[in-house]
Amino acid sequence: MSEHRRKPPQPQGGGRAAARRGQSGSSPGRRAAPRGATGSPSDSYGSDSYDSGGEERQYGGRAEARRAAQRSTGGSRRRAAEPARGGRRGGPNGPGRGRGRAAAVPDKNRLIDYPRVGKYGWQRWMPSWKLVSGLCIGFFGSLVAVAGIGYAMVGVPNEENAAALSQNNVYYWEDGSQMVAAGSGQNRQNVTIDRIPKAMQWAVISAENKSFYQDSGVDPMGIARAVANMARGGDTQGGSTITQQFVKNTYLTQEQSISRKFKEMFISIKVGTKLSKGEILQGYLNTSYYGRGAYGIQAAAQTYFGKEAKDLKPNECAFLAALLKGPTYYDPAGNEGIDTSATKVANTKRAKARWSWILEQMHNDKRITDQQYQDAIKNFPKLQGRKASKGMTGQIGYLADTAKKYVLNHSNISEKQFDQGGYQIKTTFKKANVEALAKAVKKVEKEKLDPENRELDKHVQFGAASVKPNDGAIVALYGGAGYENGHFNNNADTSGVPVGSTWKPFVLAAAMEYGTYKSDGVGVSPLSKYNGNDHLKVRKNDGTYVLKKDNTPFFQENESDYPWGYISLRKAMEQSVNTPFVQLGMDVGMKNVADVAEKAGILDGSFAELNASFALGTSTPSAIRMADAYATFAAAGKQAAPYSVTSVKFNGQEIDGFKKPRVTRAMPEKVANNVTDVLENVIQNGTGTKALPLGRTAAGKTGTTDENKSAWFVGYTQQLSTSVAMFREDPKSAKLLSMNGTAGEKSIHGGDVPTLVWTEYMKAALKGKPDLGFPEAEKIGEIQDELGAPSPTPTPSVEPSETVTESPSPTPSESSSPSPTPSDTCGFFGCENDGGTDNGGTENGGTDGGVSSPPAPTGTSENGGNTRGNGNGGIFGGSEG
């Protein structure tokens, strides 16, 4: 039977009575039937109609009609137009028959009307103004409640924290015995506000907290910035009022956390209600850190100006206020050991800029008169030099300084925290070694120098360091004449003193490991021959010559004009002849030389420009770093970073981060042992013979620079590697001075005074210890003579440990031997002396291979085109100790 002939089910809403009502729906006095009830086509939702002439009612009764009307007023026109989901159109469950699935009735009684009822599309998800305002009120109400609870729970501590009281730091020798107790405990004295000049008070207020006398003691925006910084991984500093800083200095630790910041805020509010502004300002100035171990305005006035706080002038007050920004970066004396950017020059520039800005702010704020401003701005205050604190005399000051730098650079401890004291630092320094090194320097100084009667013996300085190979522990150092004598620069960890020919072993090591541009990676044997004559042009890898800035050929000089001819690299190292190593460095590539030096332990921040003279030691690493790098040769190629601290405790609690540095492989064992074999020969037969009185197996290298401005000796056994530097320095400009004429000698070389100091120290340091010798040096590389070298004639094989004597060994002093004529030296690319007469340097090098002035960098990295910036030559590039 077809579907439209089926008998439809009875309507739900009332049967025949409903039908009669539908028929009479148009009668007067009666309601109009709902749409579809008349049976007319226009009233029907579907194209199929029932043959009862309207007997089928669309809605099941008045209740149903009301519900339908409610649905239609809800705005669901689309739903009303769609067929009900109960069945097909026109079917028994369709719109022409049943009511389909009823829409859910909105709950108007929800607490939060979201998503919004009766809204569709984007309007459904747009919160109403009632909801937004309600949430805001709730949020701020919660904040007020939390703030109230916090304010009630956090009280002002009854006593100052331990840090604010300032304690001593205790340093210990390697064996655990106490070296010195030093700190700022003796360098603090509180003064009352009436003894602090008004200029000092207003300098701080104008610079840091202009609204000090009006605010409640907190800066909400500053706290918000601090919290935001903390959330981003930064610190919580910045934006504090003077009250907050006083609270932090006096009652809280220096930890940087959100909880501490909020605690600081609540305590500051309470402090602001209990103390007067004068008391708060007095407390702040008495607890602030001004650098140089000075806590409080009274100690700062005495430290920097040698006067009482009450006697400070406006220009001096502005300077001390500038220090509060951070004495590490604003003390003109510099703090390069803590941060390489904190040099004397940079710090002075920063200090003057902030000092003048503070004076300007004071003037703008009407805190000083026009005349006072004019008088102050013209005179940057004259500062006192650093002074030795109790116990920091002799070498102790330099030892503690080195250990302090190491601690600051291997932890999150700030200089301010460290100087507040409470730390126990165990060092690697051995008391007997330190005393032996100082004694060796003093003995040689007394024998060789007479500053009272010889002008050229004045201002001579020494720096030295001794390191354990295969470990890195610094067992001794010599930093200078002592704090008590006004010498505060640590010469063992200094910068600016070129190392001269002590750099040549790195050139040889690079040649052995990497070979030259023409060897396809095959290492160079130390028996390879290079031209050792004086005044030679230097070739680049493409066969062209290195040029100076004026485009004339650069000529490399030796110390003397002795005609060595083609000699082995071993012989060139023995007599410290310059020309072979400059050409070898070009053939190997100065970048490879730098890489070998860096792996051995030299910091790239101390590297000079990678030009031709880089091979001759224009770089300026510290004595500590040179001793550590040579310790890599002593340890058969194993490298350990130098360290001076083995443990740190704070109030008895161990601090992490001070484990012994890891030992790594820096170069192949064969390379290191062959370098050692060559350097043994330097002491046995070359420029280092004054080390022979040591009486045991040792290796080393001498070094001298232009005009004898510095002289070095670096040597080692398997037990110790020690470097000694000697130089003269202008006390006013800190520029190096020539040592020509020093000690009554025409010139000073690394094989002279520095070698004597080294030998004297090593005798004492190694007394009673066995002579361990060195590992056997295996044959390495291939003989690769320089281009232009004559073809070798058959000769008996020579063991590497034998001394090669291609030419007689002249006494390493000023030689008057004749120079070769221009036609004597011709090579593959033509005669060496066929152009130019300028030697390319300001002075000849030292007897043991001095540095000539470098040529202008040209070409690729192979010829010195790459540049590494000069940096500090400190133990850790000036940033560590």
Image (cartoon, grey):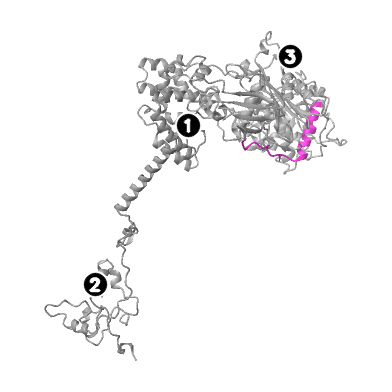
Give whichever of discs 3 and 2 has the lower sequence position: 2
Residue positioned 24% across, 74% down in the render: 63
Residue positioned 32% across, 70% down in the render: 103
Q: Which residue is mark 1?
A: 157
Q: Which residue is mark 3?
A: 448
Q: Is residue 21 visible?
A: yes
In-front residue for pair 798/563: 798
| Other residues around mark 2 within 10 Å, as few (<14) / some (14–19) / many (≥20) | few
In-image side of 56 versus 426 (left or right): left
Residue positioned 34% across, 91% down in the render: 1
- Are dots 3 and 1 in contact, CB under 8 Å? no
Q: Which mark is residue 190?
A: none
Residue positioned 39% across, 25% down in the render: 277
SS class, disc 2: helix
In-front residue for pair 415/736: 415
Query: Within the image, what quadrant is residue 56 found in?
Result: bottom left
Q: Is residue 788 above or below residue 371?
A: below
Give whichever of discs 3 and 1 has the lower sequence position: 1
Q: Name the amino acid, label 1.
A: Pro
In-front residue for pair 290/730: 290
Give the distance between the C-alpha atoms of the residues marked 1 and 2, in whole angstroms.
73 Å
Q: Which mark is residue 66?
A: 2
Q: Nearer the viewer, mark 1 or mark 2?
A: 1
